[in-house]
Image (cartoon, helix red, strand yellow):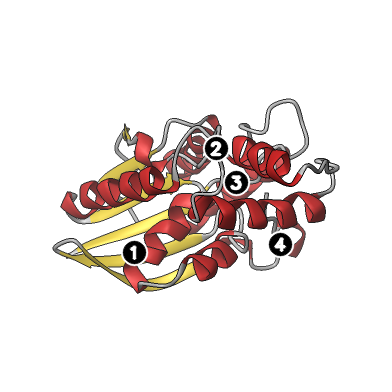
Amino acid sequence: MTEVVMVRHGQAAFASDDYDRLTDIGWEQARLLGEYFSAAEAGFDTVFTGTMRRHRETLAGIRDVVAQSSPAIAMPDAQVLPGLNEYDFHSLIAAYLSNVKQKIDHSDPRIFYRTLRLALMAWSRGELSDVTETWANFESRVRGTMTSLAAAKGRVLVVTSGGPVSAVLREALKVDVETMVNLNLQAKNSGITRYFTKGEQFHLNTFNAVPHLAGHQQLISYT
C-alpha cells in the first residue's frame, strides 16, 4: 500500500504580472510545512511535482527546512509529472467572458473566483472554445498521473495545484463536477490531501488540512 501526500502550492502572486511564483506568505507556508514534516520525522520515498514555478518553489521551501533541521529525513529529488500542472484558468476565463460578452475586474478576488467557477462549469460541459486544453483531456491526464502515483512505493510527496487535487478527489470519491469545482475553490495554499492506495484505487484519508498553520491564522490563503 502506498501513502500519497498531495500538497497544494503555497500562496501564488494573484493579480500580479507573474502569478506563477510564491509570495512571501507562500514561502512561509512552505517553510512551516517543512517544519511540520520534520517534527513528525516524516520522510518520503518518492517526490513528484508538476513543471510550474510555484510547485518547485513550494518544494524548495519544504526541502530547505527539512535539510537544515532533520537532514536524516529522506527527501529524494523530485520527478516531474506535467500531469500535475494546473489547468489554464486564464484561457478558461477569457473564453467564458468572450461567450457571455462581459468584462470583469481581474484584481478583485471575489469577482475573479466567482467567474472562474462559472467558467469551469462551462468548460466541463464543452461550451468553451479557444482553450488550451479540453475538459476531457484534463481529466485524462489526471487519471494517467494517478496511475504513476499509485505505482510508486512507500510514502509519496506530491506538490501540485488545486485543480489536480480536486480532480483526483473526484476520481477517488466519484463526485459530480459541481462538487469537484466547489472543492477546488476551497483548496487552501499548502493544504494537505492524503490518500492510501491499493492497486490503482485511491482511498481518501485527509482533505485540505493545514495543521502546520495552527496558530498562524493570518497565513491561511486560497490563491
**Mark 4 → mark 3, Cα distance in angstroms:** 14 Å
Q: Nearer the viewer, mark 4 or mark 3?
A: 3
Q: Residue at x 83, y 43 (%)?
A: 104
**Mark 3 → mark 1, Cα distance in angstroms:** 24 Å
Amino acid at the residue labelled 4: His
Q: Circle 3 is placed at which residue position?
A: 10
* Towards the viewer: 90 or 99: 99
User: Badge 3: how crowded within 10 Å, few (<14), some, or many (20+)?
Assistant: many
Q: Which numbered disc, 2 or 4, marks the residue that appears first in the sequence?
A: 2
Give the image location of residue 139, x and y in percent: 37, 51
Q: Which numbered disc, 4 or 1, marks the residue that appears first in the sequence?
A: 1
Q: Nearer the viewer, mark 4 or mark 1?
A: 1
Amino acid at the residue labelled 3: Gly
Q: Residue at x 84, y 47 (%)?
A: 108
Amino acid at the residue labelled 1: Glu
Q: Which numbered disc, 3 or 1, marks the residue that appears first in the sequence?
A: 3
Give the image location of residue 148, x and y in percent: 22, 46
User: Badge 4: how crowded within 10 Å, few (<14), some, or many (20+)?
Assistant: few
* Towards the viewer: 6 or 40: 6
Q: Circle 4 is placed at which residue position?
A: 216
Q: Which numbered disc, 2 or 3, marks the residue that appears first in the sequence?
A: 3
**Mark 2 → mark 1, Cα distance in angstroms:** 25 Å
- Residue at disc 2, secondary structure: loop
Q: Circle 1 is placed at which residue position?
A: 171
Q: Circle 2 is placed at which residue position?
A: 129
